[in-house]
Image (spheres, grey):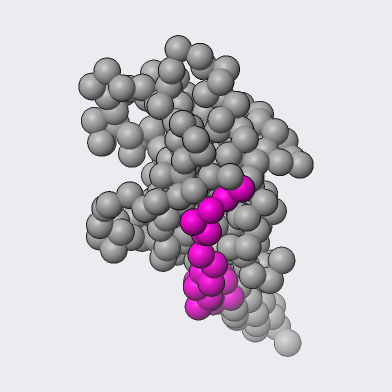
């Protein structure tokens, strides 16, 4: 076989390999699996009630397959919970950073940091924000939960989703946001979020199949 024919064979093999990889990647980025799990109305001593909003319209706007938007109360303590479930990498294409979302809703982001918090048995890195609107301030923790990983950055979570897809692991992900009204006692506010987040963390693994 002369060099021209050999080069043609090499090019053909390379093209087929690239096609095969791209086809496998495309399939990996999409999943038929839907979220089978419902967040309970009661988490520990916290009793939840759904916030009146257009969930179906919200799912369509952000591309999520499932959304929980709820207030949980324990005595005089109150925590807001927002979860958005994405079943695969493609579904999360419309995701944007929380500071962008808050700004679009008229909030001003006063503080925005990545911090370590002990949530249950694990130390997790979360996005900690203080936001303000019409003289109301809220303390917010937000993160992505993908498999057993807690990830504060959108871009890192997207990459991790892709890697899980390529390696045959379930790519679904949940964006988690918990918040409280900010009082004069910030330490107490942080404690409330940490306590609720610890209870919630034990439930998040139920969102994922194939672990």
- Quarter-of-image position of residue 98: top left
Above/below status of 6 relative to 45:
below
Horizontal side of residue 149 vs 46, given as left or right: right
Horizontal side of residue 44 vs 180, given as left or right: right
Horizontal side of residue 18 vs 48, given as left or right: right
Identified at 51% across, 65% down, the residue is 38
Identified at 58% across, 45% down, the residue is 45
Q: Is residue 26 magenta?
A: yes
Q: Which of 57 and 167 is in front in this view?
A: 57
Return the residue found at the far front: 75
Asked if residue 26 shows in the view, the reply is: no
Q: Does the magenta stretch include residue 152?
A: no
Quarter of the image with the C terminus is bottom right
Q: Position of residue 16 (x, y in %)?
A: 59, 80
Horizontal side of residue 74 vs 191, given as left or right: left
Question: Dominant secondary structure of the magenta stretch?
Answer: loop
Q: Position of residue 201 (x, y in %)?
A: 64, 47
């Amino acid at each position: 076989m002369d060099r021209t024919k050999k080069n043609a064979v090499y090019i053909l093999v390379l093209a087929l390999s690239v096609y095969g990889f791209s086809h496998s990647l495309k399939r990996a980025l999409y999943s038929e699996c839907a979220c089978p799990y419902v967040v309970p109305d009661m988490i520990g001593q916290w009793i939840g009630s759904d916030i009146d909003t257009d969930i179906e319209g919200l799912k369509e706007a952000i591309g999520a397959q499932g959304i929980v938007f709820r207030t949980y109360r324990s005595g005089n303590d109150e925590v807001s919970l927002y979860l958005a479930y994405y079943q695969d990498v493609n579904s999360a294409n419309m995701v944007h950073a929380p500071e962008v979302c808050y700004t679009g809703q008229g909030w001003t982001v006063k503080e925005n940091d990545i911090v370590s918090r002990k949530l249950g048995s694990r130390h997790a890195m979360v996005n900690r924000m203080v936001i303000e609107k019409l003289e109301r301030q809220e303390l917010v923790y937000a993160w992505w939960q993908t498999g057993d990983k807690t990830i504060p950055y959108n871009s890192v979570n997207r990459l991790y989703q892709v890697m899980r897809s390529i390696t045959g692991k379930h790519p679904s992900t949940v964006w988690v946001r918990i918040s409280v009204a900010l009082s004069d006692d910030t330490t107490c506010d942080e404690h409330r979020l940490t306590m609720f987040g610890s209870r919630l963390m034990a439930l998040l693994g139920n969102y994922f199949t194939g672990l």
